[in-house]
Amino acid sequence: MRKILIVGPSWVGDMVMAQSLFMRLKADDECEIDVLAPAWSLPILARMPQVRRGIVMPLGHGRFGLTTRWHLGKELAREGYGQSIVLPGSFKSALVPFFARIPQRTGFRGEMRYVLINDMRPLDRAQLPMTVQRFVALGQPHEAAPAPISPPTPRLQADSANQAALRERFKLDPARPAIAFMPGAEYGPAKQWPPTHYAKLAHLLAARGFQIWVLGSEKDNAVARPIANGNPSVVDLTGQTSLGDAVDLIALAHAVVCNDSGLMHVAAALDVPLVALFGSTSPEHTAPLSQRAVIETLRLTCAPCFERRCPLGHTRCLTGIAPEKVLKALEPFIDTTSTS
């Protein structure tokens, strides 16, 4: 059986979208897929049935670590991989497959890595505007058409045993439907809908009988605090769950409201209805891959700017999206579930 080593991306959302590549590879050929990726991604990979195992990249994001990469490559050389697909475009990301002497090393042209990548693909950004299309294109034969028309939709599998444990641990009411909020955005505040808007929406949903779970890392405590303040229907779980826990809790939610973030892609891959709020970024590039996703964006003339912070200082691309508008977008998903 052909063995493939994927060098995975460094962001949660990109790792979720990479499952489309894994699904395409498994559909086209009998193969085993291992993924070299950051340690945080292992719970995501464990919920992808196409992946045989995740291999931890022992270097943090941005670290070169030539000696470490050389030793890891020598260790992986014993696995007998026939191909490596390098999803990041950096020079250093292509080093381990080169050191492992994997015969076919596939990747897009980037950062002067002509020796490291011997199956070099040109990237036509107009032909492949979406990140997921670019990932899937690398899994096709070199001579194939560059644009996959319909990439497979990512589908994560939740851990039911962990779901039961989380309900017990956080005393979550199973009889009351939950809406999950993910108000954080690792990239920066230009992607974050205001906490005051989330708080207003939480009150509107609580009045209709919903409980609200606020999910995110410890970094999101500050934006979660005003959402939970004065609203007993809000359960602030930021900083209290692992990434795997967040995946399993999102799968339990009736619907999701979130920024353009990694957890947005998790929700889409779990096929949970969601409303995604786009400001400085573009849904044309990183839209949630789900038929049950509604995208709210104002499409201002200054957007998308792709900046971490609003260069004009007002972030109107997000502040202008009213909580009432988001509630209306949620209506098709919640109108038969309200308990009020």
Image (cartoon, rainbow, N blue to C red):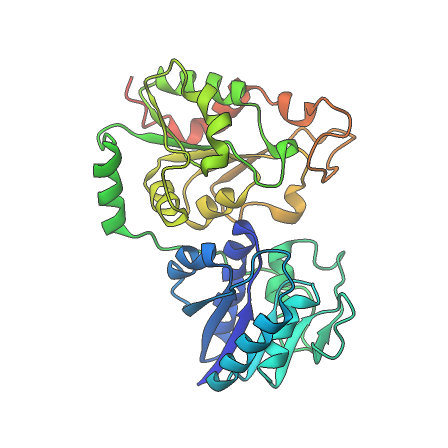
Viewer can see residue 1: yes
Residue drawn at x 75%, y 37% as measured from the top left: 305
Q: Is residue 207 left or right of residue 21?
A: left
Residue drawn at x 33%, y 27% as measured from the top left: 336
Where residue 333 sits in the image (x, y, percent)? 41, 32
Q: Is residue 225 left or right of residue 8?
A: left
**Which quadrant would residue 134 be assigned to in this image?**
bottom right
Viewer can see residue 139: no
- Choose between 15 and 241: the one closer to the eye: 241
Q: Is residue 37 left or right of residue 244?
A: right
**Which quadrant would residue 124 be assigned to in this image?**
bottom right
Where residue 13 sits in the image (x, y, percent)? 54, 50
Residue drawn at x 44%, y 44% as measured from the top left: 267
Figure check: 99 above or below 90: below
Residue drawn at x 46%, y 47% as measured from the top left: 266
Where residue 241 sits in the image (x, y, percent)? 36, 41
- Choose between 319 and 65: the one closer to the eye: 65
Quarter of the image with the C terminus in it: top left
